[in-house]
Image (spheres, rainbow, N blue to C red):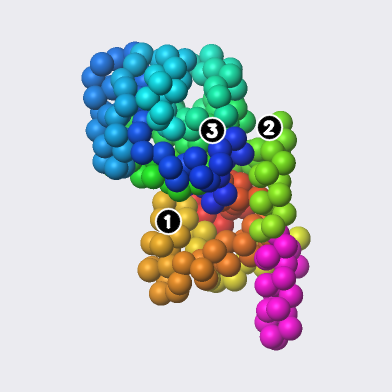
Amino acid sequence: MTLLRPPPSRFAPAIAAATTAAVVADRWPLMRVGLAKAVSLAGLRVAGEVRDLAEAAGVARQQEAGLVVVGDTDETTSATLRRLPAGLMVVALVRQATRDELASLLAAGVAGVSLRSSTPEELCDILRRALDGERAVAQALVPALAGWSEAGAGGRSKASASRGSEARSAGAAAGAAAEGAGTNAAAPSDPQVSLTSKEREVLIALAAGATNQQIAAQLFVSPATVKTHLAHIYVKLDVGGRHEALSRAVALGIVH
């Protein structure tokens, strides 16, 4: 699962870090119970249980909750997302992996997307990733987004574009240093060739839903080294973050 290390464009890291409460929204009471359980598993306080996203936004404001988890989406969800106050994070659940619906939700600024059929533990993982600043998408949904990019869906935000530029700059500098050390890195124009075996391992682990810390443990490296590998990957795949990297890697057949 998962995606973009920088926070989604509409949300500041400080807001995500300070979020300790969430409101859950779904028209079915039993579904709200499951959402509340996932919120609790993620270490958050359930600040309210309501029927829809619009109502949840009001309760979140009253209860000073920084996150809304909405269990049912429809054709109006994306429009509602765009009307929400800046800084309110939303994680949405979808019934099936349709490209149009997913692209619409992501373009509208949703912080995370999972399946309505996911387990509480899987949703909990999505919530934690979103709160950690990632654009978190369930692994099962990634193939449906192959080739999609936030820029193509309406343009990256200035902050997102800046972060992408920083990642490219960091990766380019590291790549130049590697060349100076005698490594034989291929040109960025051919991502399948230019990715090193370690970068491929990082991508595969990323596609399996691993966090930076988990990837570091699996590869016996430090989290800082994982971040460096990710910066290289972003440059070579010509993307701005995790979500786009996974989509590009799926399209190229690097991960499945």
Of 96 and 213, the residue lying toward us: 213
Give residue 87's mark: 3
Q: Which type of secondary structure does the marked residue at label 3 adopt?
A: loop
Within 10 angstroms of label 1, few (less than 14), some, or many (20 or more) residues?
A: some
Q: Is residue 21 magenta?
A: no
Q: Which residues are magenta?
A: 168-188
Q: Earlier in the sequence, mark 3 or mark 2?
A: 3
Question: Residue 66 is drawn in which quadrant?
Answer: top left
Rendered location of residue 203, percent (x, y): 52, 59
Q: Earlier in the sequence, mark 1 or mark 3?
A: 3
User: Is residue 202 depicted above or below 68 in this figure?
Assistant: below
Residue drawn at x 29%, y 29% is: 46
Rendered location of residue 168, percent (x, y): 70, 59
Q: Nearer the viewer, mark 1 or mark 2?
A: 1
- The amino acid type found where label 2 is placed reads Ala
Q: Main secondary structure of the magenta part?
A: helix
Rendered location of residue 198, percent (x, y): 53, 71
Q: Which residue is mark 2?
A: 153
Q: Nearer the viewer, mark 1 or mark 3?
A: 3
Q: Which type of secondary structure does the marked residue at label 1 adopt?
A: loop
Rendered location of residue 29, percent (x, y): 26, 16
Question: Residue 167 is drawn in which quadrant?
Answer: bottom right
Residue drawn at x 71%, y 46% is: 161
Give the CA separation, mark 1 to mark 2.
Answer: 26 Å
3 and 2 marks in contact (CB < 8 Å):
no
